[in-house]
Amino acid sequence: MKRKGMLLVLPVPFLVKENRLFFDTQACNGLERWADNFESVIVAAPTIPEALAAQEKTMTWRDTATLEKPERFKLVPLPWAYKISDFIYCYSRVRAQLAELIENSEYLQFAINGLMGDWAVIAALEARKQGRQYAIHTDWVTHDVVLKSARGASLKKRIKATVEAPLIEMYHERIIENCTLGLWHGQDCYSAYSPFCKNSYLVHDIHLKPGDGIGEKELNKKVLRTKIEPTLRICYAGRIEPMKAPLDWVKAIGQARDNGANIHATWIGDGRLMDEMKALIEKLDLNSCIEVTGWEKNRDKLLQRIKESHMMLFTHVTKESPRCLIEALVCGTPIVGYQNSYADELIGDFGGGKFVAMGNWQKLGDLLVTLSKERQQLSNLIREAGENGKRFNDQAVFHERSNLIKKHLGVSTLPEMLTPQRQQSLV
């Protein structure tokens, strides 16, 4: 039997509702771009319980029946098994299911994400058993995210994270050591995982279309307006979660306000620290200059809000690679925040950002004051961001990754020796 197409095993969940199968809107775009480059795509992912999906306010769901040319796709819902008892109960059945999918697919790509319930790592183990080559993709350093996200949580959650993090680290290293191709989204992931992989590439993940970015005429107007507008407009788009340090974000703005900066800041998103964030805004008397809007499902409105902002202020404290920073550059909006390898790499050759040491919200506040006063410097950053962002769009990044997969996974069984040099890609 001839193998065909690509198998993707993902952590992004399916949702079954009223006998219809839904998937995250941006993930659907990703599937369509993969299918532009492969004759068919099989997608296996866990199925989130409907009650949990109702609590998830930062995802927008799309009916998979609306996928472009749906005949190109085979969608395989897997169990939601993040409890050890659920995982053990369905392990054998799911592994057998994955074994058949692997046997029938020409190319294999697995997006690892955790420990229990992560079917991508089980697929990797099965692929190795069958002597098949596979690619691993991830956009965060999971053990680092698990540890740092537990800070400030209950004692039980901190103990759980302390136990799980080293297990995840060892587990993922084993999976990566046995893969043929590593696609690491962002410099932090590349630095953490490339030493364990024979063929490692730094890639970027973006779902914006070539026409979604800021145009040259619009960018020129933004640069001119920035020099004369009295109010510094700041935005952030993402979850209000510990890994984003939203309280540091609020305190940095408070520091800038107290030192004379005229600011209007908007956080577009939702999350478990929403109430705590609003309480701090109230405490620091920042209601007149900080707006928390909740999640914006309309993509065009979100992009317009980012384009209208003078900067995207971020306070990320874990090794992750948030797409919002790339989206900001595409919108001609500089990225300003806590220094990390991911952000450093994004602006390294092209500019469009300014950073301070992670955790130093006081210095970040001082930087906001500087940029508020020195509008020529801010205008230069906007110009750099707009030029930098031109290289990012979904067609380009998915086409490049598809070519890497075809190049490195073109042989169906593992060769005896693989010794090519590790390489790095800018998109």
Image (cartoon, grey):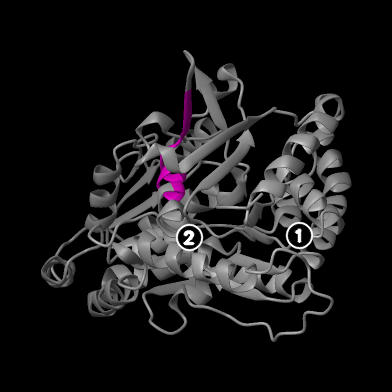
Q: Position of residue 322 (x, y in %)?
A: 51, 56
Between 403 and 165, the one nearer to me in the picture: 403
Question: Crowdedness of circle 2 by 10 Å Cα count: few (<14), some, many (20+)?
Answer: many
The structure residue drawn at horizontal position 29% and vertical position 67%, both measured from the top left corner, is: 372
Which quadrant holds residue 210? bottom left
22 part of magenta stretch: yes
Residues at circles 1 and 2 in contact by the CB criterion of under 8 Å: no
Is 41 displayed left or right of 118 in the figure?
Answer: left
Determine the residue located farthest toward the front in the rendered image: 1
Q: CA distance from mark 1 to mark 2?
A: 25 Å
* Amino acid at circle 2: Asp
Residue ID for mark 2: 205
Q: Taking the image as drawn, is residue 358 in sight?
A: yes
The magenta span reads 21-31
Q: Main secondary structure of the magenta part?
A: helix
User: Label 2's element?
Assistant: loop
**Where is 384 relative to 3, above or below?**
below
Between 213 and 378, the one nearer to me in the picture: 213
* Amino acid at circle 1: Arg
Q: Taking the image as drawn, is residue 339 in sight?
A: no
Residue ID for mark 1: 132
Question: Crowdedness of circle 1 by 10 Å Cα count: few (<14), some, many (20+)?
Answer: many
